[in-house]
Image (cartoon, rainbow, N blue to C red):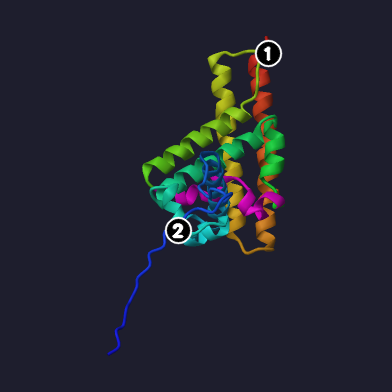
Amino acid sequence: MSIDIYVCFTFERRPEKGRLDMRVTKAQAEQNRAHIVATASRLFRERGYDGVGVAELMAAAGFTHGGFYKHFRSKADLMAEASASGLSRTAARAEGLDAAEFVEYYVSREHRDERGDGCTIAALSGDAARQPADIRTEFAAGIESLLTALEPRTDTPEDADQRAARTMMIDMLAHSVGALMLSRACPDGSPLADEILDVCRKQILASLVRASSDQSTAGSPEA
């Protein structure tokens, strides 16, 4: 008579000596999050908020889809943070530029063609208008920061001068954003796309000269 004996061995897996701890540090997690936000900000500018999904976005950043929820509660949270990041970047670019220099850069073919690296306001304002209040709040704050960065520094901080300067900056920014959006709406390489930029850039620059002249006249002793 044969007897079959089955012996079950249980192995406990122990960490190998000298093996690196693969847990992500807090600093690395923050870097990963910042990289995801930067990647999302670029892709949203290129394709719009609805033009890229979470899985594709995470793949572009070099991470798995599942890792997304370690950093963000939802895509909407990432949209708000990516918008804030892009808007802050736009304001930083405007620092040190006067209004005319800003227009020369902003209302240009180079800026029009670099959607992923360009201004968040021009790229996503149309989308933002249909988004929840938190995203629109980020846009309001970003636009305000850009206006502050562009506001001319004057030696006469009277309320009337400040209001006139702010009016001029809002008018300039609205026309510049509109020109870029209209040009981008045309087919790539379209003569009309270039014509829109050329005409609007000249008109905006001329309006800045007129507005500056009017302010100088109003502030002169003879006025």
Q: Secondary structure at mark 2?
A: loop
Which residue appears farthest toward the left when viewing the image? 1
Number of numbered markers? 2
Return the x and y of residue 111 as percentages of the image width and height.
67, 49
Q: Residue 77 colored magenta? A: no
Could you tell whether 197 is left or right of 36 in the image? right
- Between 215 and 13, the one lying in front of the other is 13
The reply to whether residue 53 is in sight is no
Return the x and y of residue 46 as percentages of the image width and height.
57, 56
Q: Label 1 belongs to which residue?
A: 220
Numbered circle sitting on residue 87 = none
Gap between marks 2 and 1, in whole Å? 85 Å
- The stretch of residues the image draws in magenta is 110-131
Q: Label 2 belongs to which residue?
A: 13
Task: Using the image, determine if residue 191 lies above or below residue 91.
Answer: below
Task: Using the image, determine if residue 36 lies above or below residue 167.
Answer: below
How packed is label 2: few (under 14 Cα within 10 Å), some, or many (20 or more)?
few
Who's the residue at 54% across and 47% down the image? Answer: 32
Which amino acid is tagged 2? Arg
Give the mark nearer the N terminus: 2 vs 1.
2
In this view, the mark in front (2 or 1)? 2
Return the x and y of residue 213 as percentages of the image width and height.
69, 25
Q: Quadrant of residue 204?
A: top right
Q: Residue 130 colored magenta? A: yes
